[in-house]
Amino acid sequence: MGSIPFGYILTKIFLKKDIRNVGSGNIGATNALRAGNKVIGYTTLVLDISKAIIPVIYVKINFPELIFIVSLCAFLGHVFPIWLKFKGGKGVATYIGILFSIDILLGIIFITCWAIVFFTSKFSSLSSIIATLSIPVYLLIIKDTNNVIFFITMFVLIFFTHKENVKRLKNKEEKKTKIY
């Protein structure tokens, strides 16, 4: 499910555009917003979140010992979709679905941190990186270190997918994002 490129599919069908030729060139929700249609952008967001929720909840109920493996698979499928020559999105929406599926509190912490950073800075990329880091930090603060390695790994992967954004942020060249 992680490999279903919803941003690509929706922009191709409804806008007759290849999202890979718009903005950052990635297939995620933020770039779908840049493609010029908020409905498609937010639909992409919901579908990218859902493509993690469905398999992770299923596995959580039926095979709980495999929850982190299925989570990683959904994430990697989004970032490296087989249908688009392994060039996908940055994985943030899929990660949000993973967080809410594993523990609703983790999802709320992520969304809260993301919103605070975003409404302060207007940089979606910076918000995503800091919010992703907030999860392992939170787990270390409450001394729940059982699964912190998984969330540190997810931070490293999301930081990696945002490496170009980090360069632009560092050089003060990153564009602010409008979400409304």
Image (cartoon, grey):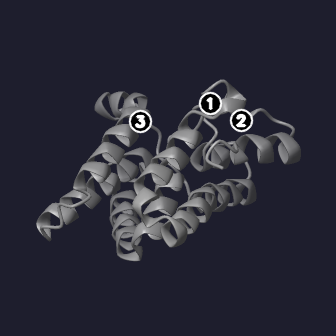
Circle 2 SS class = helix
Residue nearest the observer in this picture, 120 or 7:
7
* Residue found 87% across the figure and 44% down from its top: 13
Q: CA distance from mark 1 to mark 2?
A: 6 Å
Circle 1 SS class = loop
For disc 2, the marked residue is 19
Q: CA distance from mark 2 to mark 3?
A: 18 Å
Say which amino acid is labelled 3: His
User: Would residue 82 be found to the left or right of residue 66 on screen?
Assistant: right
Residue 162 is labelled as: 3
**10 Å crowding of disc 3: few (<14), some (14-19), many (20+):** many
Residue nearest the observer in this picture, 69 or 88:
69
User: At which x and y percent is residue 49?
Assistant: 58, 60
- The image quadrant that residue 146 belongs to is bottom left
Say which amino acid is labelled 2: Ile
Q: Are marks 1 and 2 in contact (CB under 8 Å)?
A: yes
For disc 1, the marked residue is 25
* Residue found 42% across the figure and 28% down from its top: 164
Query: From what the image shows, is residue 164 above or below residue 38?
Result: above
* Residue found 35% across the figure and 75% down from its top: 105
Q: Are marks 2 and 3 in contact (CB under 8 Å)?
A: no
> Upstream in the sequence, badge 3 or badge 1?
1
Circle 3 SS class = loop
